[in-house]
Image: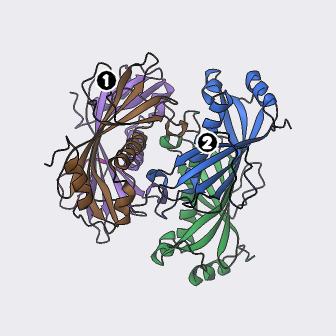
Chain colours: A brown, B purple, C green, D blue
Amino acid sequence: MTAMVPVTNEHKPHGDWHRTPLRVPLYEVDLGQAVYHGNYFHLLELGREAFLRDLGYPYRHFMAQQLHLTIVEASCSYRRPLLYDDLIEVHTHIDGWRSRSLTFSQAITRNEGTGGRVLCTEATLKMVCVRFTGQPTLLPSEFVDILRDSSGVPQR
Amino acid sequence: MTAMVPVTNEHKPHGDWHRTPLRVPLYEVDLGQAVYHGNYFHLLELGREAFLRDLGYPYRHFMAQQLHLTIVEASCSYRRPLLYDDLIEVHTHIDGWRSRSLTFSQAITRNEGTGGRVLCTEATLKMVCVRFTGQPTLLPSEFVDILRDSSGVPQR
Amino acid sequence: MTAMVPVTNEHKPHGDWHRTPLRVPLYEVDLGQAVYHGNYFHLLELGREAFLRDLGYPYRHFMAQQLHLTIVEASCSYRRPLLYDDLIEVHTHIDGWRSRSLTFSQAITRNEGTGGRVLCTEATLKMVCVRFTGQPTLLPSEFVDILRDSSGVPQR
Amino acid sequence: MTAMVPVTNEHKPHGDWHRTPLRVPLYEVDLGQAVYHGNYFHLLELGREAFLRDLGYPYRHFMAQQLHLTIVEASCSYRRPLLYDDLIEVHTHIDGWRSRSLTFSQAITRNEGTGGRVLCTEATLKMVCVRFTGQPTLLPSEFVDILRDSSGVPQR
């Protein structure tokens, strides 16, 4: 899932980002024939879930400690629409982290018939670690240890 | 729907933004007990729909001309979570427009029991007018005329 | 909200069902240009929420007691598609109840330009009262008292 | 995908139904901590999509002919709740078909740690073949040929 990814004619995402292959479901598509803009966050979430699982710290581990990563800021650039049944890849990367927060950069590319890959979506999500009560708290230390060991994820 | 809105202790949104009162539905709330981050776009859309209807150019008019306003960039700041059954108001404003695009600023406030209103969500959505085929095109001239006549909506 | 409702050329729903007027949002519509079949449950839920509120026992009261009404069986007949921006009414009725369960019958009609109303959707939902832990439990006694006082809601 | 499936202590679904393994996404779960009742239709749809693809007639083929399979009746029995991150399998079977319609039976089982499988959800969906205009029409003949060749799918 983390092999090199030469993206066609695009600088980002870098080849060392995590990749999750998906197919666009019918129920994410709206009357404009492309994925509804709020539903891209479903696809991005599937990418982050797979990323955390492959990192060795699935989201389930947060929840077992009565913690959530709650999203406080999101931005998304819809460069090219995703259509029903498109074969896509969600690219996921942690930009940086602090004691209570972290920021993901993500991108979605579409596989073209020619074997190339076209950048369709770019997103940034900043999230804060909170208890189930909503109170902000420290990221779990075991998770932080994993982040420290992951090359290319800067503490900020 | 367009009456003055003094927002408690907040500079934005301004009092002359359009307001749509809503109640947060159960099905928008996820396992973290707040509205799922992608579902805020449903609430924001309901606000824009009401705004366009009250402006005299409902979205149905775009579609009748085989046009869509497709979202090319969105950003959202989730300052305070929206909870099930919260009484909220979606505030909507057009920041500016060009021949083929326009940008909305929106905010969601929650009504507090004291009669005050707390700013929970801020969002910006940039959209482009496209034909059903996906090709960018001019905003309908009748819609542009309405924008020109609306004080406070600058052409940029 | 509970006035008599003569439905055009249809036997059901009866005129004494609760009615909630709604407009079909864009985000509920899929690429087939009608509401996605799973999303009719959003519209039906908005009807039941308004019904319970008008009955004097909003769903929030269940939750305040750490209770949910969890759906155990649902069926829906999609007789005519609901389209974007349709003006509709959700009709809601409790068919019957037992100590731990109750069954709703619901229907959705579309307002026609002629002033008539066409039956588009019929649904039945059976739900069981459960604690937040998932364990089935008795319906709250205050809610049962309201049901007993409501003419036409049989205990079964 | 179509290997024999002994389901723990359950008569249905039969072992020759098509199976699609999935993991329950976070965004399908509501404030009750289980999948929202309307969102089970997303999971069921993913199963039917995979079924049609493996049958050699993906849904894309219908759409290429300006056809949809529109759902006219659905029923779902929610026997046990599906929770976030559950490993599940969607079992799909065509009960029967006529010239313009077909009926799917589906089930969702959850994988238990012991290697067993527990039946959680049962659903039946009746659908009609329609043109993009909404007009009912014959199922595509190539699709009917495939159904005829599939043992165990009766014409009714």
In the depicted view, which residue is nearer to us: C41 or A50? A50
Which quadrant holds the C terminus of chain D? top right
Residue highlighted by disc 2: D47
Asked whether residue C135 is drawn in magenta, I would say no
User: Compared with residue B15, is residue D102 higher up or lower down, i.e. above or below?
Assistant: above
What is the chief secondary structure element of the magenta stretch? loop
Residue D47 in sight here: yes
In the depicted view, which residue is nearer to us: D126 or C26? D126
Image location of residue A20, percent across then percent down = 40, 37
Tag 2: amino acid? Gly
Left or right, residue D128 beside residue C26: right
Residue visible at 28% across and 72% down in the picture: B114
Q: Residues within 10 Å of mark 1 (few under 14, many from 20)?
A: some
Residue visible at 81% across and 35% down in the picture: D151
Asked whether residue B15 is drawn in magenta, I would say yes
Tag 1: amino acid? Pro
Residue highlighted by disc 1: A6
Q: Chain of mark 2?
A: D
Task: Tell me which corner region of the image, top left, top right, bottom left or bottom right, holds residue B123.
Answer: top left
Magenta segment boundaries in residue numbering: B1-18
Dot 2: element? helix
Give me the C-alpha separation between circle 1 and circle 2.
32 Å
Left or right, residue C131 beside residue D18: left
CB contact under 8 Å: marks 1 and 2: no
Residue visible at 46% across and 31% down in the picture: A34
Q: Residues within 10 Å of mark 2 (few under 14, many from 20)?
A: many
User: Compared with residue A136, is residue C83 higher up or lower down, i.e. above or below?
Assistant: above
User: Compared with residue B131, is residue C95 higher up or lower down, i.e. above or below?
Assistant: below
Nearer mark to the viewer, of 1 and 2: 1
Furthest toward the front, the residue is D114
Which quadrant holds the N terminus of chain D? top right
